[in-house]
Image (cartoon, grey):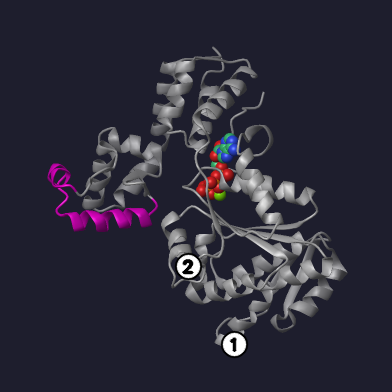
Amino acid sequence: MENPFVYGRYVSGEAFTDRAEELSYLVRELESNGRIFLISPRRYGKSSLLQSARQELLKKGLLVAYFDLYKIATMNQFAEAYATAILDASKSKGRKIMKWITAFLPRLRPKISFETPEAPSLSLDYSLESEESWKELEAIYHLPQKIAMQEKKKFVVMFDEFQEIEKLGGAALEKQLRAAIQSHNRVNYVFAGSKRHVLYDMISNRARAFYQLGEVLNLQKIPAEEMARFIRENMESTGFKIDEAAIRMILEEMRNVPNNVQLLCHRLWSENQRSKRIANANVEQAVLNLVLSYAPLFAEIWDTLTLFQQKLLKAIAQTGGAALTSVRNIKRFELRSSSAVSRGLQLLQQKGLVDKENAHYVFTDIFFEKWVKMGR
Ligand SMILES: Nc1ncnc2c1ncn2[C@@H]1O[C@H](COP(=O)(O)OP(=O)(O)OP(=O)(O)O)[C@@H](O)[C@H]1O
Ligand SMILES: [Mg+2]
């Protein structure tokens, strides 16, 4: 029997729960000229939500491109992969695509290869050294609008991990992309990402190109009652018995972060195959096993940190990350000064190890936090 709990990748169908409101809001906005910034901490379910929205929009006859910036390392790759994603989403084949390329990207001298007739893959014989050549990339940003006009359809472009754009092409790319996007009346966009401080700066700083370009959808955790129901149903339908207290413990230990809840349930489900019975003690054991399984990885991360950063992480683990700059905590954890603490927190945020939640700092990885707490 398959494990009903899925983690670490986007989920759909049975493994996807709730989000009905967010989904219908997204779909509604994207069919009707909205632009959305979809923001949440890591692992809350942004990509899964985008995939569900994509399915709905396709059913309604729109063209939809999903473009993940995560693995893109250079501007050239960006241009190629973006053009490929747009052409791919156009659902058109060989000859039509060749025609579009000649018409819409004349100066980029693209080479196109088809692995299968449906999946074009584009490579640009192009260098981005001069400012002039950089400017010619604009043609690519206009591709969805041009195709949408030709096909008399609406186009939706979904950027995932959008904050990476900053590293790729800096302010110049942001400006160029914004100008293109603003001129499109047949293309609607979603910009999704998890580096919240980067994204908020992009959209709330007047000096930046994406200032107020769209509405912000802050994706929250899935309501606890809904997650509880999800756990119970998936356990029971696969022959398990689980205590209510154990469900509450799972949600509490994992702070109800969707990915972590599914990860722990996945583990519980496979660890307790014989008894098919889950109580608090089993939850405790599974959490411990997970922390231990990650320990070598955590130790490696730990060794890359300065002593000061290590002290700061211990302080966060022990205080829950509130009032770290208070005189009392600075003394207790030997943190030098409040400005040193602020700088340290900023660095830990840049490293992706901590995140700011309201007024306090939290570990992005709950298991790392538990490992730090366990006696480092
Ligand atoms: N609607 C949902 N119902 C149940 N579980 C979910 C849901 N959305 C997300 N999850 C859980 O969270 C995991 C991560 O989801 P997803 O990759 O969509 O999140 P993300 O916000 O895009 O993460 P990242 O920030 O790492 O890109 C999934 O594998 C699943 O375990
Ligand atoms: Mg994602």
> How much space separates mark 1 and mark 2, taking CA atoms?
21 Å
Task: Tell me the residue that label 2 is attached to.
Answer: 167
Instruction: Please state the horizontal and vertical placement of residue 257, each as a whole percent of the image.
Output: 47, 37
Magenta residues span: 326-352
Q: Give ligand 1's quarter of the image.
A: top right
Residue 132, which numbered label? 1
Please tell me how many numbered marks the rendered image carries.
2
Instruction: Please state the horizontal and vertical placement of residue 137, each as a whole percent of the image.
Output: 63, 78
Residue 357, which numbered label? none
Q: Is residue 8 visible?
A: no
Which quadrant is home to the C terminus? top left
Instruction: Please state the horizontal and vertical placement of residue 131, each as a whole percent of the image.
Output: 55, 86
Which quadrant is home to the N terminus? top right
Q: Amino acid at mark 1?
A: Glu
Whether residue 213 is situated above or below residue 226 in the rendered picture: below
Whether residue 356 is situated above or below residue 224 in the rendered picture: below
Predominant SS along the magenta part: helix
Residue at 79% in and 70% down: 149
Residue at 43% in and 23% down: 249
Q: Is residue 345 magenta?
A: yes
90 or 110, nearer to the observer: 90
Element on which disc 2 rests: helix
Q: Is residue 346 left or right of residue 162?
A: left
